[in-house]
Amino acid sequence: MPETLTSETLTKPPRQLFLRPKTKPPSKFSKVINKAIVRTNVHFYRRSSGRILGKFGDLDAMLITTVGRKTGKTRTNPVGYLWDNGRFVICAAYGGEAVHPGWYLNLLAVPQATVEIGREKIEVTAEALPPGPERDRLWKRLVDVFPAYSKFQNRTTRLLPVVVLTPMDLVQPRAEPAS
């Protein structure tokens, strides 16, 4: 059974010596290949309403559309998700690369996004979870369903972000301060 990684265990060196930590961003060639794979995945997911490429192993897949933090253009990417208490839980793994995926950086800049699950489109608000018990609980669930996340974490020195997407109709409005 692979060791479950938490905020505390990340200080330990990886046990698997054959996995070299990634310390550099992906090459230009890797980015071109990745972009082609993402476009193909998005195309087939939409054409089949999620029946084709709608899973990553045992993890269900969705499409997330974010607003580019630099360009303002919409960007769509496939991500695996879990359902947890009315929220979607995703991980910004990027295959264990040394840098965060662009969609995650876009969510940090503009937390509103749209997800597509099959034919359904849902407006959501994103929140990256800080290290702590809630993140550790959801990380364990993600790794249980998709064990490759553990390998991705061992390949990088960054803590893989766990992001909660709350449907807009469930977002609680913030109370106005009393004057």
Image: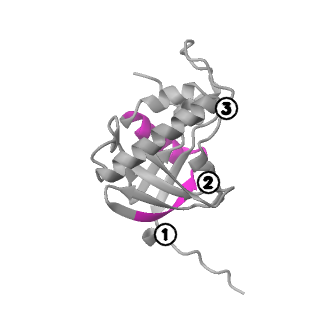
Instruction: Give the class, few, some or many, for how many residues have Cα within 10 Å of label 1's Cα (few <14, many ≥20).
Output: few
Instruction: Give the class, few, some or many, for how many residues have Cα within 10 Å of label 3's Cα (few <14, many ≥20).
Output: few
Q: Gap in Å between the C-alphas at discs 3 and 1?
A: 35 Å
Q: Which residue is drawn at 32% across and 37% down?
A: 58
Instruction: Give the class, few, some or many, for how many residues have Cα within 10 Å of label 2's Cα (few <14, many ≥20).
Output: many
The residue range painted magenta reads 122-144
Residue 127 covered by magenta stretch: yes
Residue identified by numbered label 3: 25
Labelled disc at residue 78:
none
Residue identified by numbered label 2: 106
Which residue is more in the foreground, 44 or 16?
A: 44
Q: Gap in Å between the C-alphas at discs 2 and 1?
A: 20 Å
Residue identified by numbered label 1: 171
The N terminus sits in image quarter: top left
* x and y, in percent, of residue 8 in the image: 60, 33
Secondary structure at badge 3 equals loop
Q: Residue at x 60, y 46 (%)?
A: 102
Of mark 2 and mark 1, the one earlier in the sequence is 2
Q: Which residue is drawn at 39% across and 34% down?
A: 146
Q: Do callouts 2 and 3 mark residues in contact (Cβ within 8 Å)?
A: no
Q: Can residue 48 be seen in this view?
A: yes
Amino acid under disc 2: Asn
Of mark 2 and mark 3, the one earlier in the sequence is 3
